[in-house]
Amino acid sequence: MAINTKINTSKLDEILCRYEYKKSNLIAILQAVQEEYRYLPEDALIYIGTKVEGLSPATVFGVATFYAQFSLEPKGKFEIKVCDGTACHVRGSMPVLNAIRNKLGIKEGQLTTDNGLFSLETVSCLGACGLAPVVVINGKVHPQMTSDAISIVLDTILKEEE
Amino acid sequence: MAKTLFIDGKEVEFTDEPNLLEVIRKAGMNVPTFCYRPDLTSFGACRMCVVEVEGRGIQSSCTMPPEEGLKIHLNTEKTRRIRKTVLELLLANHDRNCLTCEKSGDCELQKYTEEYRIDKIRYAEKEDYLPIDDSSPSIVRDPNKCILCGACVRACSEFQGHAVLGFANRGSKTLVQPLRPLGQTDCVNCGQCAAVCPTGALTIKNNIEDVWAKITNPNVKVVAHIAPSVRVALGEMFNLAPGENSIGKINAALRKIGFDMVFDTNFGADLTIMEEATEFLERLKSGENLPIFTSCCPAWVKYLESMHPELTHHLSSCKSPMSMQSPVLKELVPKILGVDKKDLTVVAIMPCTAKKFEILRPEMAHDNVPDTDYVLTTKELGKMIKSAGIDFETLEPEVADSPFGEYSGAGTIFGASGGVAEAAVRTAYEFATGEVLQDVDIKGLRGTSERCKDLELDIKGTKVIVRVVSTLKEAEKSLQEIINGTAKFQMLEVMACPGGCINGGGQPRSCDDTKIKSRRAQGLYKEDSELPVRKSHMNPSIQKLYQEFLEHPASHKAHELLHTVYTDRFKNSYKDV
């Protein structure tokens, strides 16, 4: 079930207006909303489903839950994506993933750290198999990761955050 | 000219059938299906209706259009094997507690499992069961029994326009679900999703045991009143033909079960017409709040309150026949039975699932006593009759109790789309002109297949256009006309279920035969044509009620008991975030 935060309808109206309240722009609308809130709040889905002609809250929910890119839970300030495609997997993406989990204290099935700083998920293939195993943090690609290498990357971020 | 194709070597004619499955059915044969419903678009999800087409291999018959000269085979080794595999895979994920399932005995998955001799489920039972959503007063959703045929999703969006149900997630995690628990959504409780559901995934909330508890309690008197549409459908559960009027048997069965008195909601329908026709004429005279909307359908009322609260002033302030009849019974029956008002239980037997929601509205109570205590659907009554051990088929017909069991033909046609408008016009004409309406059959308002009918009438020089729509999707189009200022009609009758109450969510199964609707409607029109009184205001019991109790239509007393107010659900609903 989705999580809720108080949403700002004028912000949503601005996004909807930018995409002309069009049903065919739903994915773009959802992407813009996710950029704003770092996830899709339930009330936002309902608002979109009500305001856009031809959609209903359940239909918007269907699209939002269909695509892996959309999250119904808040993501962290730093979104970590560990590639677990075939090439990355055989080159050792799982040890990298476990190293991240241990370092940040993220349990299996948990998306975001308790302090909201990091969220962690695996993705199927980033198309950078030559650099395997790959970890992407907020859009920045970190190639040929190992448990030690990722630890250093995370330490750098943590230090900056302090 | 009719074209032909071959089914299992037999030449079969076809004309404009949209798909092979319809041709197969027309030829008197059948193939199993979960997802195909003639009133909904073809979906091709379940793959049970596969047939072998020579030269084309395996095809799903619900999505393939018929072609001249096709040679198709229904039961080959391959098609039977495919159907069996489909069943086995569905069963692998399905809740296996068939014995205690609400749908048991009426479930298509159960039926085909038996017919296809699946005597063992090869796969292990799933470990995690999802929670059941029983937040709605009318509908229970059990995702563990869903086979993802999508019939409910299509019914919700194609009949009612605003899809409350939708597919969520992806792959093996796919679910049919509303965004929030059903009770917190804009679901209008029409029950059409449950009516098309092949399994027990969507069922109607059941009040059978509550009613039994009242009946078996010696300190409580229980009375029932029966809606028009119940009489032409209940018989289907006992081998009677659709449309056969079994009201006499129903009266007898209810008395056998232990109801102290049995009345007829048609009386309430006549009462509705008295008030609504008066209100309509007043509005015509003043020109205010036109067009008038009928307010009998609780699904329609809730839809308007949540989607267009700015238009609720168009709604007639009249309560529905059920909600008019019940307070009159609560007021007057205690004297007849010699009991306290609080010891009287009123049960309404309805074709409708939204009525279960309607009785919970705060306006439907007086002095903290609900007007209607329970609503039983047609199907629930059928189950009750069965569990009471009554042989329905051989019952001798009985008449309802006087005076709230007497009705006119105008009351009985309420159950069919167009019936309320026809009944209102019969009375409004005579009220307005003081003349006798000779031809009471207003055929232009009848018919269950068209979802929108317009008829222009001449009430002594005043031109009136009456519009009749069924399904809320169709109603929304008329609302848009009003919003755009292009609407020409003065009266709008809306019933949320396609074809009207005769096809309500609480009726016995009718989703795979489009003819059942029209047969039930014909059953009602037949009863109307055979009754001595066919206009609501000519019903002697109604006249007496006004003389002795209500004074005149729209009187103070009538307003207190028979009229209602509407809520702005938009403001309260989740959309106002």
Image: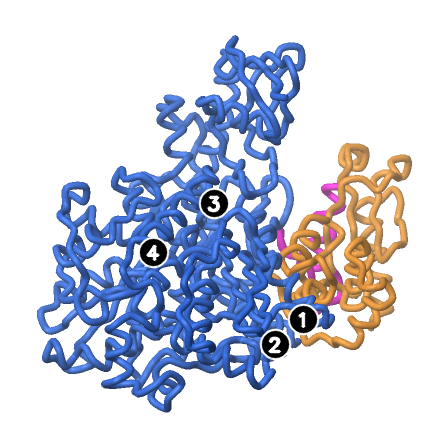
SS at mark 1?
helix
Residue lying at the far top in this picture: please name it. Answer: B9
Q: Do dots 4 and 2 share one subunit?
A: yes
SS at mark 2?
helix
Looking at the colours in the rendered structure, which chain would you say is drawn in orange?
A
CA gap, disc 3 to disc 4? 29 Å
Q: Which amino acid does label 2 sit on?
A: Leu
Please identify which colour was used for chain B in the image: blue
Using the image as rendered, state which of residue B65 and residue B572 is in the foreground. Answer: B65
Q: How crowded is mark 4: few (under 14 residues within 10 Å), some or many (20 or more)?
A: many
Task: Say which residue label 2 marks.
Answer: B311
Q: Residues within 10 Å of mark 1 (few under 14, many from 20)?
A: some
Q: Which numbered disc flags the more N-terminal residue, 3 or 4? A: 3
Magenta span contains residue B21: no
Task: Say which residue label 1 marks.
Answer: B482
Task: Say which residue label 4 marks.
Answer: B528
Give the residue at x 53% y 16%: B12
Q: What residue type is labelled 1?
A: Ile
SS at mark 4?
helix
Task: Say which residue label 3 marks.
Answer: B196
